[in-house]
Amino acid sequence: MGYKVAIVGATGNVGHEMLNILAERQFPVDEIVALASRRSLGSEVSFGDTTLTTKDLDTFDFAGWDMALFAVGSEATKIYAPKAAAAGCLVIDNSSLYRYDPQIPLIVPEVNPEAIADYKNKMIIANPNCSTAQMVVALKPLHDRARIKRVVVSTYQSVSGGGKEAIDELWDQTKSIYNPTDSKPPKKFTKQIAFNVIPHIDVFMEDGSTKEEWKMVVETKKIIDPSIKVTATCVRVPVFVGHSESVNIEFEDFLDEDEARDILREAPGVMVIDKREDGGYVSPIECVGDFATFISRIRQDSTVENGLNLWCVSDNLRKGAALNAVQIAELYGREILKKG
């Protein structure tokens, strides 16, 4: 049995990845449609060996379709997601619009698959922020063993998290460094991103944190445990694809680094590469195109009673967005549609 699937925002970076991953994972599709705004109408996108011509999102009828994977911004999602849900089509949304609605499940399938049961509240499931998704995959199995009290995380986030304009800006500025007559001032970012780092993602909030940092706090609590304290510093770095995170964890109970390493090796969605030698760890360029969340540099933190440090890397366009959405679709198909 296959499903009828719509990809909303099929011409964007995440939409492309959704199509690629559906094909790679041989998702059971009977029919698939690529939807986009009118300015992209007629554009062609690939789904495996098939070429799809985009159709107009504004006039599309979602009745009879099983699920729609949304990869458009919050403003468009606000208009079209309720229409799809009202037509009986499950919405799996990659924007931030519904993540903090208590009636809408926020799901990372390796972490809280049981939340799928709440889809029926509004026929909408939210995909978490890219930086949160990879971190909670690493935190959950450790939390189950020793109960996490507090997390201090610093992120090193690639420009692809800011979309095509951000990728183009890094590329153009990098080239202009070697051609001073062709200056490329920042447009997408607040400062030059080439050969630089910017400790500012999303808007500033009243307490001095940015919204990206706030998202990591609130989403970790919703997905894993509201009692976990989280503090984050989110930084944009001149990397095209792949988010990295330095994570410091304080537990209620002692957890030895060797046991933590063994737990993570057995955890779903995690790949441990942790050798204490040159190159015995994973960097973002090595995770591009992979499904896994990679963990390295696991070690005790001697400055607190029950502390660990680790390094967490993942392809943000995949686990941070498209892959997680497809995994939710797989979970919905397996646990809801097949069981009828």
Image (cartoon, rainbow, N blue to C red):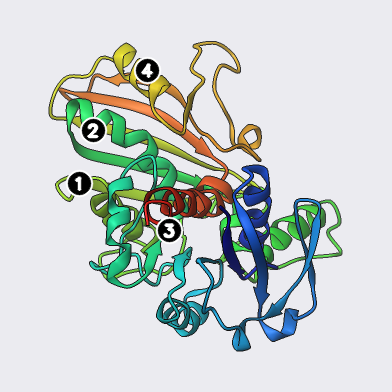
Pick whichever of labels 3 and 1 is earlier in the sequence.
Answer: 3
Numbered disc 1: secondary structure: loop
Q: Specify few, some or many for label 1: CA neighbours under 10 Å numbering under 14, 14-19, or 20 or more.
A: some
Which amino acid lies under the numbered mark 1 shown in the image of this protein?
Answer: Asp
Q: Residue at x 30, y 45 (%)?
A: 112
Mark 4 residue type: Arg
Lower position in the chain sequence, tag 3 or tag 4: 3
Q: Secondary structure at mark 4?
A: helix
Observer-nearest of 314 and 190 = 314
- Counting residues from the N terminus, which is met first, the one under dot 3 or under dot 2? 3
What separation in Å lies between label 4 and label 1 (alpha carbons)? 22 Å
Sequence-wise, the earlier of marks 4 and 2 is 2
Choose the circle earlier in sequence order: 1 or 2.
2
User: What residue is pinned by disc 1?
Assistant: 225
Please, what secondary structure does the residue beneath circle 3 have? loop
Nearer the observer: mark 3 or 2; the answer is 3
Circle 3 sits on which residue?
Answer: 127
Residue at mark 1 to residue at mark 2: CA–CA distance: 9 Å
The residue wearing badge 2 is 143
The span from disc 3 to disc 2 (Cα, nearest Å) is 21 Å
Find out whether the residues at labels 1 and 2 contact each other: C-beta distance under 8 Å: yes
* Residue 261 image label: 4
| Label 4 – label 2 distance at C-alpha | 13 Å
